[in-house]
Amino acid sequence: MLRDLPPRARWYILVVIAVGAVTFFTLLPRATFTPIVPLIFLVLLSSLTSAFKVHLPIASGSNMSVSYVVDIAALMLRGPHATMIVGAASGWSQTTLNSSAPNPPFRTLFNIAILVVTVQAAGQVFLRLGGTPYAESGAMVMPLAGMALTYFFVNTIPIAIAIALTTNQSAWRIWKTDFASSAPSYLLGAATAAVVIKVTESSGYWLTLLLTAAPLYLTYRMYRVGRESEARQGAILEAAHDAIITMDQELNIREFNPAAERMFGYARLDILGRNVELLLPPASRARQVSALNEYMATGSGTLAGRQIELLGLKSDGSEFPLDLTVARIGSDSRAVLTGFFRDITERRALEEQLRQSQKLEAIGRLAGGVAHDFNNILMSIMGAADLLLMQLPSGDSAREEATEIKQSVDRGAGLTRQLLAFSRRQATRPRLFALGEIVGGMDRMLRRLIEAEIEFEIISAPDPLMIVADSGQLEQVVMNLVINARDAMPKGGRLTVRVEEVELDEAAAATLAEGKTGRYARLSVADTGTGIDEQTRAKLFEPFFTTKEQGKGTGLGLSIVYGIVKQSGGYITVASEPGRGATFLLYFPIATASEPAPAVA
């Protein structure tokens, strides 16, 4: 819409439309419309050829409509006033009938206005230089050249200015890059129009029709091939999951596909013409821009034939990791860079999950080995303490010390059991049971652990979700998570325990370390408490890591939860932000009712 354009572009377009309207309605009454049939033929021919575009290698590889040849012929035959109708028809056809996408009315009016002013100016120059349709060839050179160049400048410069004002680019750079090199084509078009008129003069309209039929057909075929090629290229850009960004010699953005819009948060029209440094964070901007300039200038450097990792900058100011591959297309003077950007935020997160999982696995093996050996020592001490108690008479003062030894050994044994649970080396008794029934059966006990200010709810799926695990250990998991959630809400809040069935596809499974696709029973414990920052989340399941005050936590609670879930063949993850609560998500593979329980581990 016109109101969506920058103010300067909006006013410029309105002024051009006004000038075109005044020119058309002021000078049209002076036009001669007879004979009417040739004029109608020129109008139809201009409308048809407005859709036919030829590739101009000399003009930076641009595509150009050939209707200007008909406009020039009409100027020579009917003069500038009547030719305004031909130009208006061509402008209307280009934006209304022959556009691949609907255009707003202001664009159609702008295009018509440009062509009306163009044919009027070119026609006046042709007449001032003494041009007539049937003059001798030598006398036609100056009028033809003047008319063609006037048509070229008046037609291209206003369009370049409009593009510059709309996209915040340099009008001179746009005109020089996209239009300047097409000037010879206008001269060639004027010569072609003169030849056609000469043939018409000597041989009549029938020979002219025969001579123009073949070029028109070839032009149409070239147009069809070009449109198909553009459609294929457009489909590739639309469907690409990677951001594809094309940059000119100054690293200004010339193409920005939909994936780039989604990735960086900029609309295509807002970003076109702006420098690619806008998409790079300040800390690395100078280095990356230097590498792009080096590759643009020489075709070599750190970007040549390589994929690099760098940080991108979104429109909201947030940074994110990227993979970048750059291709240099074109000759040295006309080269452009096309960058293929891939957001690797998810990949980085998965790599971090894998590293964390491997780290916990290594810690678990170490803790399990230490706990096993330490437990053997404790059992020896326990046996000695029992023998000592058996040998000491009931009134002996040493019995108190022996009892204290036995109690300390019991506490040490409890610690080793926790370490063994984390390392997944604790003996378990897995059985087949409905997850919702076990969790629902804990309702009364859990409510006794929760403060009155906390709203507590258990929500279970209507269908029984059968899993294979140690039910006692699962109860320990739920209790641990609920207590942690309670402690995170000292001023009250809402605590929800939910059991539901989920289907993990490849995308969802990829978000879990070593995740597999399939049906799962998901147990979630969500609170509205203080939340967990990213740095804490990274260490959450490590043994002996705690955020509680000294003496109020061993740092083994979540480590045990992690070990039990992994030992049950499941996965655990947490979603949280500071001040927005936390949600622990536990996934257990759904088993069938006929599935036998595994042997005791």
Image (cartoon, helix red, strand yellow):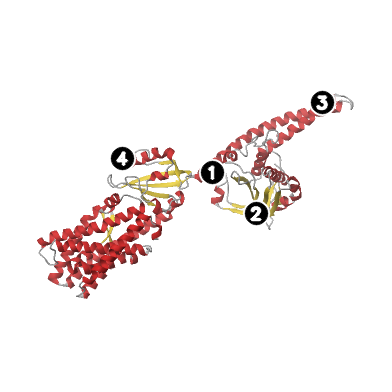
Evaluate whether residue 139 shows in this view: yes
Which quadrant of the rendered structure holds the C terminus?
top right
Q: Is residue 27 left or right of residue 466?
A: left
Q: Is residue 168 left or right of residue 415?
A: left
- The residue type indicated by label 2 comes to Glu
The percent position of residue 76, horizontal first and vertical second, equals: 17, 66
Q: Are marks 3 and 1 in contact (CB under 8 Å)?
A: no
Vertical arrangement, residue 198 with respect to residue 298, above or below? below
Q: Which mark is residue 350?
A: 1
The percent position of residue 353, horizontal first and vertical second, equals: 56, 42
Q: CA distance from mark 4 to mark 3?
A: 84 Å
Q: How many marks?
A: 4
| Mark closest to the chain's N terminus, 1 or 2 | 1
Q: CA distance from mark 2 to mark 4?
A: 59 Å
Q: CA distance from mark 3 to mark 2?
A: 52 Å
- The residue type indicated by label 4 comes to Thr
The percent position of residue 14, horizontal first and vertical second, equals: 33, 61
- Give the labeled residue for mark 2: 500
Q: Residues within 10 Å of mark 2 (few under 14, many from 20)?
A: some
| Mark closest to the chain's N terminus, 3 or 2 | 3
Residue 69, by quadrant, is bottom left
